[in-house]
Amino acid sequence: MIVGKCDCGCPTVDIQVNGGAPSSSVEPKNRLAPYGGRVAALDGEPTGDIILFVDDGYLSCLEYVYYTDHPPAAWPALDRVEVAEVRS
């Protein structure tokens, strides 16, 4: 369930997982999930990144990192996102 949004206008959201869902056995470093997404450039815009945060074994935030002066208003189409390993 979405429980919060970023104030800048980008689509980043805070998430709360309903009770009863199994937790992840993955131990993330610095709250970062081991994988995220790399957003392909579109119409000359730079690439972006999607970072997944995990707290206490549950997904807690989906962050859309953008590299422009103006935040994107929506999540990119799935065909623009490639799974990428997070290096910390």
Image: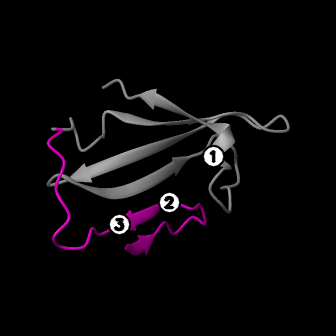
Q: Which of marks 2 and 1 is in front?
A: 1
Numbered disc 3: secondary structure: strand
- Please tell me which residue is depicted at 49% across the width and 66% down the height of the picture: 6
Above-or-below relation of 55 to 79: below
Q: Nearer the viewer, mark 3 or mark 2?
A: 3
How many discs mark residues in the rendered view?
Answer: 3
Left or right relative to 81: residue 6: left
Residue under pointer 2: 12
Q: Residue 24 carries which label?
A: none
Question: Can you give x and y, in whole percent of width and height, for residue 4 in the image?
Answer: 41, 73
Q: Dot 1: within a 10 Å radius of its alpha carbon, few (fewer than 14), some, or many (20 or more) residues?
A: few
Q: Dot 3: within a 10 Å radius of its alpha carbon, few (fewer than 14), some, or many (20 or more) residues?
A: some
- Please tell me which residue is depicted at 30% across the width and 40% down the height of the picture: 33
Q: Which of marks 3 and 1 is in front?
A: 1
Magenta stretch holds residue 3:
yes
Above-or-below relation of 73 to 85: below
> What whole-number distance in Å separates the C-alpha atoms at marks 3 and 1?
20 Å
Residue under pointer 3: 15
| Magenta part of the chain | 1-26
Q: Residue 78 carries which label?
A: 1
Numbered disc 2: secondary structure: loop
Magenta stretch holds residue 22:
yes
Query: Which color scheme does this rendered protein use?
Result: one colour
The amino acid sitting under disc 2 is Thr
- Please tell me which residue is depicted at 35% across the width and 23% down the height of the picture: 87
For this orientation, the residue located farthest to the right is 43
The amino acid sitting under disc 1 is Leu
Question: Can you give x and y, in whole percent of width and height, for residue 42 in the image?
Answer: 79, 38
The amino acid sitting under disc 3 is Ile
The C terminus lies in quadrant: top left
Q: In which quarter of the image is residue 32?
A: top left
